[in-house]
Amino acid sequence: MNGRADSEVPDDVGGAGGPGDLEDAGDVEEPAETARQARWTAAGTGALLALAGLAASVLRAAGSAPALVPAAYAFGAAVCAVAAGLGLRGRTRRALWLLILGVLVMAVGDQFD
């Protein structure tokens, strides 16, 4: 070989039974389990944010806030509820972006208070 001496692949990387072997690692999860956790996380977070937005909308509507504030909270809660539904169907990336959008709408609506 004409290459450098330190360019060789060490024996412990990718070898059977070495420290770099991923099959021996106890913390590696199944892809299906990871996807299931992502779905439940997206659905649970969306439902929680939808309930929080709905509660804030009712509380702001009962107070002396302008009409735009409870409407923003209600719209943000609806967006988060849609995100929860998408999360249950496995569309976790879209659910994440809708959760961000829903919270952003609620935060912008809160600025008008």
Image: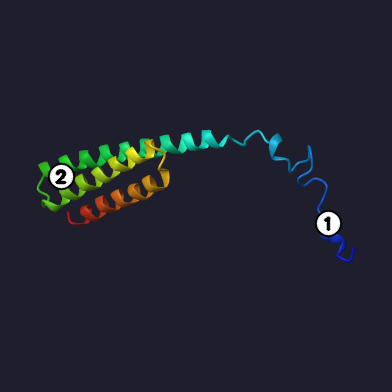
Task: Write down the residue under mark 2.
Answer: 60
Query: What amino acid is found at the position of numbered circle 1 in the picture?
Result: Glu
Residue found at x 80% / y 45%: 12
90 relative position to 101: left or right: right
Mark 1 against mark 2, which lies toward the viewer?
Answer: 1
Q: In the rendered image of this protein, does residue 22 appear above or below residue 111?
A: above
Residue found at x 29% / y 49%: 102
SS for callout 2: helix
Query: Quick one: quadrant of the N terminus?
Result: bottom right
Q: Position of residue 90 (x, y in %)?
A: 42, 39
Query: What amino acid is found at the position of numbered circle 2 in the picture?
Result: Arg
Q: Nearer the viewer, residue 111 or 39?
A: 39
- Give the spatial CA distance, label 1 vs label 2: 67 Å
How busy is the neighbourhood of tag 1: few (under 14 within 10 Å), some, or many (20 plus)? few
Query: Quick one: quadrant of the C terminus?
Result: bottom left
Q: Are marks 1 and 2 in contact (CB under 8 Å)?
A: no
Q: In the rendered image of this protein, does residue 2 appear above or below residue 27?
A: below
Residue 46: quarter of image: top left
Residue found at x 68% / y 36%: 25
Task: Write down the residue under mark 1.
Answer: 8
SS for callout 1: loop
Q: Earlier in the sequence, mark 1 or mark 2?
A: 1
Q: Nearer the viewer, residue 65 or 32?
A: 32
